[in-house]
Image: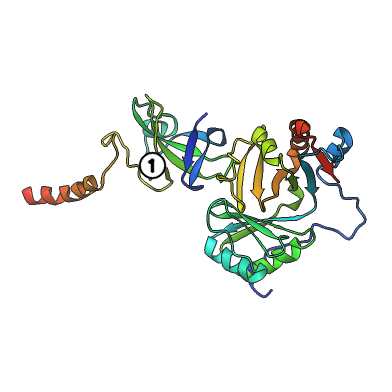
Amino acid sequence: MFHIHCPYCGEHREEEEFHAKGQAHLQRPADPEACSDEEWGDYLFFRDNPRGIHHELWVHAVGCRKFFNITRNTVTYEILETYRIGEQPSFTAEYPDGRRPQDATREAQAPLKAGVHA
Amino acid sequence: MSDPVIANVRTFDTRTEAKIPVKSPLAYAYRRTGAPAPTGESRVVLRERPFLGHLVLRGGAIVLDEAVRAVLGVPLPGEPQGLTRDAAGERSIQWLSPDEWLLIVPGGEEAALENRLREALGDAHFAISNVSGGQTLVELEGESARELLMKSVVYDVHPSHFPVGKAVTTVFAKATVILRRPDEQCWELVVRRSFADYTYRWLLDAGEEFCLGVER
């Protein structure tokens, strides 16, 4: 058994208290009526199955009963971070070692530079 | 009660004046499994405190804190896993989740208290549910109470990790309980009524080596 950090309880709790709930950050199409069958089917039934970093929705079922997200490595099973609903992960496929503050500044400057070149 | 929001909520006292025999959630277990009386060798004593008033408060921490302070004079535990009690130790309030608290008061007080809280909260966004009938409180006391819990719950109950004034919801055997530590001597378990028989029998079995006795 291992421990998972619950961002709402603020401490590590036994794995037994948690349930996995599938892929995180699923976006419901803004206008379902305008979706093709394929788009709607993708949204409802098809999930990513990456090798490496994966963002998952978990629930602290026995405990505070809140949903939160986990960034997990599907190869090593390592849990890289847990974060609350509404927050963004710092470990992503582009930043496998974690997103540093300077990365955020660089991204913010990128559109400016593009504007200068144009 | 001129406020339309309050007027729209129908609250009632679940305890009737009628002469209906009230049975504790452990009544069946006492009859079926028995209750070994505590002896001089008992290192754990189990005591049920049935028929207390249990209220679940949901809503924003700030508005609830103001209302609970005004009505009970006890602050809402702001930190996760917090448990606070009034001076007499009879009324306690516990953090359950970021927007949920459990308030336990002496039996019979809960209906009036609920109404007073509703009045204090006015038209704030909140919910109060009376769950007194759904759960019961079991106390464990004695030198081996912690050892008994170590056999039963997945949570770390070492004093360095579980100081007085902490309360967690966790896995107990194959059920769930709310585990609380109101003071140095005693541990409290808030047990669901439907799991009370199972939990009681588990405690009796696990506590056999500590000569567990049941105080009634």
Q: Residue furthest right?
A: B19
Q: Can see residue B191? A: yes
Residue in the picture at 77% in, 63% down: B109
Badge 1 local density, few (<14 within 10 Å), some, or many (20+)? few
Q: Position of residue A15 (x, y in %)?
A: 53, 33
Looking at the image, residue B185 sits to the left or right of residue A29; the answer is: right
Q: Quadrant of residue B106?
A: bottom right
Looking at the image, residue A37 sits to the left or right of residue B62; the answer is: left
Task: Read off the residue under disc 1.
Answer: A29
Helix, strand or loop for disc 1: loop
Foreground of the two, B71 or B134: B71
Residue in the picture at 78% in, 43% down: B46
In the image, residue B184 above or below residue B62: above
Q: Position of residue A79 (x, y in %)?
A: 41, 33
Foreground of the two, B28 or B112: B28
Chain for disc number 1: A
Looking at the image, residue B112 sits to the left or right of residue B100; the answer is: right
Residue in the picture at 76% in, 39% down: B43
Q: Position of residue B123 (x, y in %)?
A: 59, 68
- Disc count in the image? 1
Q: Can see residue A118? A: no
Looking at the image, residue A116 sits to the left or right of residue B187; the answer is: left
Q: Position of residue B56 (x, y in %)?
A: 65, 55
Q: Quadrant of residue B25?
A: top right
Say which amino acid is labelled 1.
Pro
Foreground of the two, B212 or A40: B212
Q: Residue furthest left?
A: A117
